[in-house]
Image: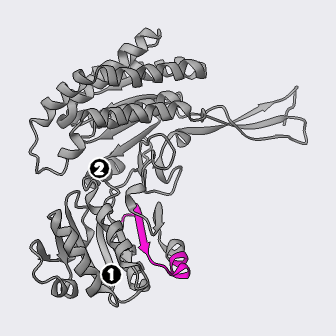
Amino acid sequence: MQTIKHKIKQTHTAAVELSQLKTAAIKKILSDFAQQLVEQSAFVLRANQKDVAKMEQSNPLYDRLLLTPQRLNSIAGSINKIIKLADPSGKILEEKKLPNGIHLQKITTQLGVVAAIFESRPNVVADIAALCLKSRNACVLKGSRDADNTNKAIVKIIHTILKQHQLPPQLVLLLPPQREVVNELFTATKYIDVIIPRGSNSLIQYVRKNSLVPVIETGAGVCHIYVHKDATLQMAVDIVMNAKTSRPSVCNAMDTVLIDEKIAAAFLKQLAAVFAQKNVIMYADAKAHKLLKGYPYLYKAAKEDFYREFLSLTCAVKIVKNETEALQHIAEHGTKHSEAIITNNKKTAEHFLQMVDAASVYHNASTRFTDGEEFGLGAEVGISTQKLHARGPFALEKLVTEKWVLRGNGQVR
């Protein structure tokens, strides 16, 4: 454990060099990184196969762990988008001359050292490393055993590039996967400026409760879609289908569909037909269960099913009387991640968008768009569900803090 603290201290020291780099140099580092991820894809994919071979395909984390040539190309593409984004540090947010003659500026500046704890998502290594380098932050990465071989392969590429640019590889530090390391992170208050947990709700809550280092939560997603009585049913079916089945293992996938009782029978008939093609399991309340009788993957919902983030081809179904009941259900069971309403009634839609307490709210669109890249942010550290510092896709623009700079000519108080 002594060596871990020593390594974190080295990263803290190395961060000073990064803060002084020119923007052009950072862009070249990231460009080389994106290029090498593609050119060395066979190396990364071999490492990934070692990790994938140890996990059952039925595990909800399997899809998050798996890399393919297409996914590697997508990661490289995200890095190239990050390169094109404006540098978030060094921006003058406010400037004025005080009555005493002091010239005052408020300027954005890097956080310093960003630590991230995550599970079974090797793409997170590349995303966070690229975002941190672009924003002039050093990073400390703590992945899980599940993805350790893949994480090491990606970090090896990063380290090679940093050395080629005469920079210390400690700017991107990958810690051992053992859980004991986490407690060392929690007490490294001198060397780490913020910790960002990305993974299961249990991981996030553990970090929040135990870390002495400030924490930015990226929350688990229990996401809802409310199908209002004035919805176009085919549109609603298409959106719900996309939100549940396009990639069910991610946090922005739909977990519960709420249906207005006035259109429940017609909507569920259409939804069941398409869900059956994907073998989607439905946990339905009493009213919906009765309407879905004969559906091959149907179960009666228990109370706890409406609090679940399924991360699989499974969802909960509930029939509600109206928008008020839908809002009440979301307030009780949601995690403030992503919520949607499907309706042609603009007044109802605007009321829903205003009243739902969530990082991202949608009208007539899939919750699957809650993503840093989809929002034009290049990539994300995670989806923040808290209200301080960052909310929603926590990306490049939020990897900075503020500094007040005052220039005088002898003023005293």
405 shown above or below 374: above
Q: Give the range drawn in magenta.
A: 335-351
Coordinates of residue 116 in the picture (x, y in percent):
36, 37
**Is disc 1 in contact with disc 2, using a CB cutoff of under 8 Å?**
no
For badge 2, the amino acid type reads Tyr
Q: Which residue is drawn at 32% across and 20% down?
A: 39
Q: Report if residue 140 lies within the magenta region.
A: no
Q: Which residue is drawn at 47% across and 19% down?
A: 29
- Quarter holding the N terminus? top left
Coordinates of residue 112 in the picture (x, y in percent):
51, 30
Coordinates of residue 30 in the picture (x, y in percent):
46, 24
> Disc 2 on helix, strand or loop?
helix
Q: Name the residue under label 1.
A: 259
Q: Can residue 245 be seen in this view?
A: yes
Q: Badge 2: how crowded within 10 Å, few (<14), some, or many (20+)?
A: few
Which corner quadrant of the image does residue 265 belong to? bottom left
In this view of the protein, which residue sits in the foreground, 53 or 128?
A: 53
Q: Residue at x 9, y 36 (%)?
A: 54
